[in-house]
Image: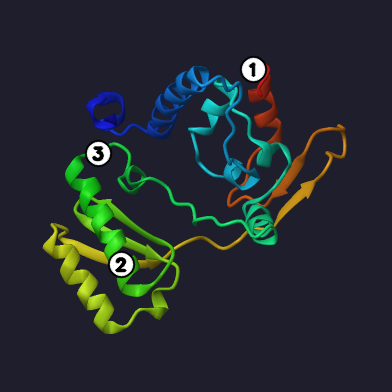
Amino acid sequence: DFLEDDSFRLNPPQRCYICKKKMYNILKKYSKDINFDTIIDGTHISDLLEDRPGIMVNYQKNIITPFAYGGLTKEEVKKLLKDFNLEYSNSTTCYATRIPTGNEITIKKISRIEYAETMIKKLTGLEVVRVRDENEKALIEVNGYDKLSKKQIQYIISELKRVGFDEVEFANYGIPNKELVLYKPCRDRSGKIMFEIEMPYQIDISETCQEMERLGNVK
């Protein structure tokens, strides 16, 4: 029960790191018991462009990430799954990520988020649904808000208020796709992969290089 651990329950910014470290400690022990030497996960290049503190556990625990090493993006992984006719479910983040960091994670919050997302998916048929608990306000992000009828919206609002949300707001899920350019192999180093993507902000390259030198070798 992760909520018995204050370091996770109090919901610090590194909650995903704490969670994944616990998970892989268990998996490491289990893999040793059944005589497996290697654990792999599905991290891909697109994941590396998002705020995912848990990815650091992969390096610390020597978890192999073949999609990342192969330079595959999320879209390329999905295309390969379809090409090989392999069944898969659309990935989703855990319910704890719906609660802003600094706000305590409780059974009540997790339960009503789970209920809300399940209810909306069944009612609308939409694949991507996120219900974020922002201090008793439910922020509902869906991939297709314009597809919802007035009757569906009214029902969703009434149901979420019934389970304790004071306010309900809708938004379209996702951000505009940014063009990702991959170099396989890297132009300057064979056996390495380099990628470029347009960032939503500017950085000072010289200052960044100085900071990297100050930190020393960075994997």
Do the residues bearing badges 3 and 1 touch, measured as CB atoms within 8 Å?
no
Please state the horizontal and vertical placement of residue 156, each as a whole percent of the image: 23, 71
Residue at 33 percent across and 49 percent down: it is 98
Residue 120 is labelled as 2
Please state the horizontal and vertical placement of residue 167, each as a whole percent of the image: 19, 63
Between residues 40 and 7, which one lies in front from this camera angle? 40
Task: State left or right for residue 67 relative to residue 97.
Answer: right
Dot 2 or dot 1: first in sequence order is 2
Against 39, is 89 above or below?
Answer: below
Quick one: label 2, few (<14), some, or many (20+) residues within 10 Å?
Answer: many
Residue beneath disc 3: 105
Between residues 52 and 215, which one lies in front from this camera angle? 52
Q: Nearer the viewer, mark 3 or mark 1?
A: 3
Under mark 1, the amino acid is Arg
Q: Nearer the viewer, mark 2 or mark 3?
A: 2
Please state the horizontal and vertical placement of residue 204, each as a whole percent of the image: 66, 37
Residue 15 is labelled as none
Task: State left or right for residue 25 relative to residue 137.
Answer: right
Against 185, is 23 above or below?
Answer: above
Under mark 3, the amino acid is Ile
Residue beneath disc 1: 214
Under mark 2, the amino acid is Ile
Where's the C terminus, which quadrant? top right
Residue at 40 percent across and 66 percent down: it is 142
Residue at 27 percent across and 65 percent down: it is 119
